[in-house]
Amino acid sequence: MRIIRLIFIAVGLVLVWQTIVLLTHVPPYILPGPVNVAKAALTHAGPLFDHAMTTLFEIIAGLLLGTLLGTISALSMIASFSLKRWLLPVLVISQAIPVFALAPLLVLWFGYGMSSKIAMAVLIIFFPVTAAFYDGLRSTEPEWLELAQVMNAKPLAVIRHLRIPSALPAFASGLRVATAVAPIGAVVGEWVGSSKGLGFYMLHANARMQIDIMFAALVVLGVLSLSIYFSVDWAMIKIVYWQKEETE
Amino acid sequence: MNNSTKTIAGHGKPPSAPSVILENVSFSYPGELIFRDLNFTVKGGQWTCLIGPSGCGKSTLLRLISGTLRENFSGKIHFSDGNSHTGRTAWMAQKDLLLPWLSVLDNVCLGSRLRGEMSDQKRQKAISFLEDAGLGEYSDSLPSALSGGMRQRVALLRTLMEERSVILMDEPFSALDALTRLKLQDLAASLVQGATVLMVTHDPLEALRLGHRIYVMTHRPAKLSKVMIPPGSPPRKPGDPAIVSLQAKLLDRLVGGGNP
């Protein structure tokens, strides 16, 4: 049902797009129609695919690293109170500076290649994952903790068997937000300085007035982002399996 | 049913359950005195019921005995066979507190898991508990598949798995419908035999069905009434005339502020 609805939305949007182009007679170098874009996509399928793979790799690497770092920092904040008091302000400060403003610096430090784009994505993903997971970890049902205390539970077992599982729904929603914004990091990084990736390809096409290619890259980027998002969403539903009825 | 419940009760029941002795216990929440110099003994191996209005400190008393409340507390709480708090009590609350991500079987074994003592033997024991309580076919289900009464039965088994000689119960059956409640009271009475039980309730009938000894708790700071010892041994029949007349007397005590 969900897939059918998605197809309907996609087809609807394409139709609206085509109608606007037909009605307004916009020149194709301002807004090419879907047919033109599809043609451009087919003739440039090779480079589009190569650049898409670069961007995909950057997003996935950023997601994995950002989630890993976010999980570790949330866990260490819940395990050690004094660590939390030092780490939490650092986290807030790191978010006070817009990541986009850091992009040129990151390119300077990590170079033209993929690392600076992955670093961008990690910076964007890290905070929502940490914040959501940490919130979940510390809002464990107090009565569960009390029961565990009467049972003489070991502190690590409480984190493993109570706090982490009960924080997974919060972690899942944090990761969903992170996944939705992860492509921004990669693409902005590519705009600032790179020779590969969909962001770079769009700027390159734009500079040569190949607006149809630019649109084709945009569509590919959208499909890429959606696929990643739905994969993560699916995995999250599996992870919080006991909430199945509510999430479906 | 009787045969099967005896099997459960026979599992590693402590030979003699200790009394819980409270001496000069005082406790206050910020700006609010709950107990002042309270002296009270929960008799070993018997089922003691505490009944009283909401907010008079019944649950607080359970928490003091379990050791989960330690601040702003003075006096002495000890067990007749030793002093240590830790590892002596099991806890059963109004909410079943089942973990939604664990199977019924794993929920019954929760204590062993949390102490890192999980073994095949424990697992086997939990399985036989579940089978004896008529929940055998649900051992792999998630708690969400169970009814409220079944969930509370699982919570009862989880409490028994702890093999503690002192069991503290905080209105464990109050969220259930009348019929399910009666059934669970019977089951609980047969399963916990031999242990020292302190149960908080606000249902006079429940106290009269299950309690060897019943106290009414009132006022702030809380006071306990004289003990009421209903005739016969629990679980008593709800229609028993003696129980019905005692129920009226108990309600009078509740209304009259705990005086005999």
Image (cartoon, coloured by chain):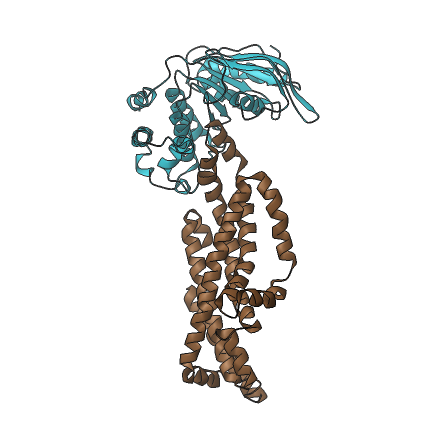
Chain colours: A brown, B cyan
The C terminus of chain B lies in quadrant = top right
**Residue A132 picture location, percent across and down:** 55, 50
Percent of width and height locating residue A224: 45, 69
- Whether A166 is drawn above or below B18: the answer is below
Q: Quadrant of the N terminus of chain B?
A: top left
Is residue B140 among the parts visible in the rendering? yes
Residue A78 at what x, y percent from top left?
Answer: 54, 41
Q: Viewer-proximal residue, B187 or B256?
A: B187
A115 versus A128 height, above or below: below
Q: Position of residue B86 (x, y in %)?
A: 48, 22
**Who is closer to the viewer here, A97 or A110?**
A110
Instruction: Please tell me which residue is depicted at 63% across the width and 62% down the height of the picture.
Output: A98
User: Which residue: 48% across, 34% down?
Assistant: A155
Q: Is residue A229 visible?
A: no
Q: Which residue is located at x 40 percent, y 52 percent?
A: A238
Quick one: B187 or A247, which is closer to the camera?
A247
Q: Toward which corner of the image does residue B58 lie, by quadrant?
A: top right
